Amino acid sequence: MTADTIAKNTFPETTKDLQNYQWHTLAEQQVVQTLASHSEAGLTHEEAAKRHQQMGPNQLTAKGGKSPWLRFLEQFNEPLLYILLAAGVVTLLLKDWIDAGVIFAVILINVIIGYIQESKAEGAIAALSKAVTTEATVIRQGQKTRLASIELVQGDLVLLASGDKVPADLRLLSVRELQVDESALTGESVPVEKATASLAVETPLAERSNMGYAGSFVTFGQAEGIVVAIANATETGRISQLLESSTGLKTPLTRKIDKFSKTLLYVILGLAALTFAVGLGQGGSWINVFKASVALVVSAIPEGLPAIVTVTLAIGVSRMARRHAIIRKLPAVETLGSTTVICSDKTGTLTENQMTVQAIYAGEQHYTVSGIGYAPDGEILIDQQPVDLNADGHIALWECLEAGLLCNDSHIEWGDGQWSVVGTPTEGALITVADKAALTQAALEQELPRIDTIPFESQFQYMATLHELNSKRGLNVIYIKGSVEAILKRADKMLDPQGQLAPINPAAVEQKVDRMAQQGLRVLAFAKKEVAANRQSLTHTDIEDSLVFLGLQGMIDPPRQEAIAAIRACQSAGIQVKMITGDHALTAGAIARQMGICSDEEQVFTGQQLAQMDEQELAQAAEQSTVFARVAPEQKLRLVKALQSKGEIVAMTGDGVNDAPALKQADIGVAMGIAGADVAKESADMLLTDDNFASIEAAVEEGRGVYRNLRKAIAFMLPINVGESMTILISIILATVLPILPIQILWLNMVSSVALIAPLAFEPKPGQVMQQPPRNPNEKLLSGSLLQRILAISVFNWVVIFGMFQWVLQTTGNEPLARTMAIDGLIAAEVFYLLSITQFLPSLVARIQGKRAPVAYAPAIGILGVVILQYLFSQWSILNQVFDTTRLTFTQALICLGVGLPVVLLAPILQRFDPLD
């Protein structure tokens, strides 16, 4: 075949001319002509090479980003790091190289973490690109050839067969029993049957049966299609662009820390300037006043705050990992704890992703089936009692199960610790339910060997198989499975409970079908027809009439039982759970009602309804409803944004390519670690290693515990800094000697205080953490009650430092001794305050009383460490020289201990007004 006979039309000079075509609305020949191709021979090699040069490779491309060095340097542009940098510079001016090194190390760790987080977007695009890289069978110049999908161009003629990954967006030209798994793109839980007929413009993506989309899988049949879109122009590529344009929102903790850091920066600079001005106004030398200002700055900077935030979050990460939740970004630990809404995909997330027969109608009797998935565990029940298939009255059930087992091209196999289907999920469900009745596929196929088959075709809506039944009786049998409409119009008889022929009652059958459909079940009908033993072939004419109706089997992708319990726990914790899926509205609503997500009266919104809403209407629907079906990827993104516009903290769960943009837009994205698509994993903040929705509830629990521990850390740390700052400022105003020196402040802030704060990261979560509503997302990091607590403890710390220093100085005249006892008195107060806000003492008392409660030993370890450090600080001669301290007697040490003890009386009073648990 020559090039002249292959293509006569002219291909557009630019692919932009083709981007707005609604390919599913055009007839097959129109599509071929528009793309200047040939329906039998495809493109010539020359034309394909020309188009490849014009359009580029068939792979997803990311936008050009910033250089790694620029992204790295931009991480320093944070207010809290300004404060830390100032502390580092001050420490260098003091020529304390070790402390300066510690401060700059903290800065570097924060910068590296930020850099890694920002690199996630590039990883998501790379995963999308990998998801659509495959090989394809192509016809070019009349010859069939195998090419890498990267070489495909618009107009290429592509052949599809069972097991293939669709290499580009195709308009199907011919199909033979084609079924395609589009679950990763549309959320449809079972393979979709394909056809070639043109469709209406408004047909949703999930219902465009004449299209094949890049990245989906062929599960059955064959087809021929023409490439209509490649690379970023495909539906998968559009998702990539959605991903790039999605806003990477900061988490609540990040936002609050930023706001707090900016405020703290201004306060510190203002106080330093005030200190300098007051000192000069009192006639002090500028060098001494400058040192006092430096002391104030160092005392006010919470050097340990970034470290304790990182440690607390890291502990949360470790605890979540033990409960099957892997955190990819540290602040996500706290974010999940503050989540107010969880938006979950249905297929594979809330459900088992395994079709399961749950209801059977045969012999005018209704049966239920226990068990889920492809495991042969469960029973067939009638009136909640197990069925004895050997007893009379269940012959029709037996034959209905036989029909589903024999009219079947799939099989179940065991591997990797679980049962799975090789073939279609629907046929896998039929094999499993028969196995529950002790009917095995291998034995039955040997007893009734297959002679011929009519594969399922969408125009007929059934599959039929011819089997050798009984040569002595001179009969063979045809088993048929298909849609209820296709079977009923061809059947004139049915089996009664005893297995005798009786006139069919279509109205009664349709009533059962409606009841199953209302439960969200997909219903298949089964029939048989006996024919002569010499019949060796099967045609559609053979089953046009005189069929014997055997029964119905209703199946569903069942909800995970553990997910139901997890949803209940989330709801009791004040968290809304919403289902956002690409599946049918009836199925989504039924699953949601079974799981307790919505009530019977609640409306299920579809993607078409959402598309007609403006932003205000969408926000209202997103807030009030809990189930959204037939939703396109960009609509999932809109729903997440709508909820965020209402002030919600949104967690989005999912496992498919279609979930990626919403996962990135959400405050926290949760992907399935086993069944999740690569792009979903790369876009997510957290992965569930067991693909279990129940692990989210555990993560919420841990996240709430993390936030409480962070709040405790702030309540413990800031009073130290404020108390020190008050001491310096009042000393300047009163023109007295500084009670503590800058280098001693660094010791307090970077060594002793951090050693006492670190145990707070290991605090166990309180038992009532999941009985409380989510925090108000707009709640300030420093609430009014917390500020009052911080102020009260700060004043107490100031009294300890200033009072102890002045008393010792006036009685001994020894400045090093006064400073040493002031510092040790403050440390004693910190130790007693720590014991009053942690669970160490309550857990120890519970254990002594015989209760099986773990003892929170972390505070005891921290206190022991501080005691050792403070002993060295005051008693070791080398540290005496470095920090200008002196040795204490036993009596002086007891005095320091007694000065800090009164905080034990103050802490319970504060706990009543500002509970930290």
Image (cartoon, helix red, strand yellow):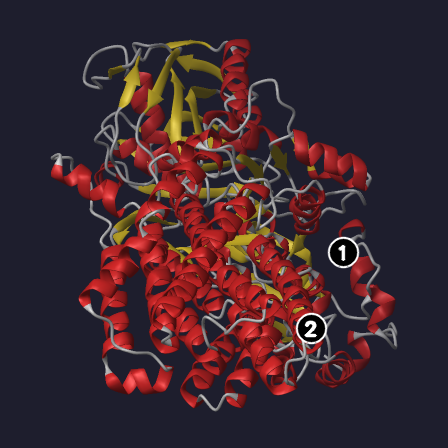
Relative to 553, residue 310 above or below: below
User: Quadrant location of the N terminus?
Assistant: bottom right
Residue toward you, 499 or 331 = 331
Left or right position of 542 against 619: left
User: Quadrant location of the C terminus?
Assistant: top left
Place residue 231 in its image quadrant.
bottom right
Q: Position of residue 283 (x, y in %)?
A: 67, 79
Type of amino acid at the residue the image marks with label 2: Ala
Q: Position of residue 401 (x, y in %)?
A: 33, 28
Residue toward you, 463 or 677 = 677
Residue 310 seen by the camera:
yes
C-alpha distance separating marks 1 and 2: 78 Å
Type of amino acid at the residue the image marks with label 1: Glu
Q: Residues within 10 Å of mark 1 (few under 14, many from 20)?
A: many
Give whichever of discs 1 and 2 has the lower sequence position.
1
Left or right position of 240 against 829: right
Relative to 679, residue 779 above or below: above
* Residue name at image x 58 percent, y 83 percent: 288
- Camera-side mark, 1 or 2: 2
Relative to 15, residue 178 above or below: above
* Residue name at image x 33 percent, y 49 percent: 420
Q: Residues within 10 Å of mark 2 (few under 14, many from 20)?
A: some
Q: Which residue is mark 2?
A: 273
Q: Which residue is mark 1?
A: 28
* Residue name at image x 54 percent, y 65 percent: 725
Numbered disc 1: secondary structure: helix
Residue toward you, 271 or 115 = 271
Residue 654 seen by the camera:
no
Q: Position of residue 364 (x, y in %)?
A: 40, 10
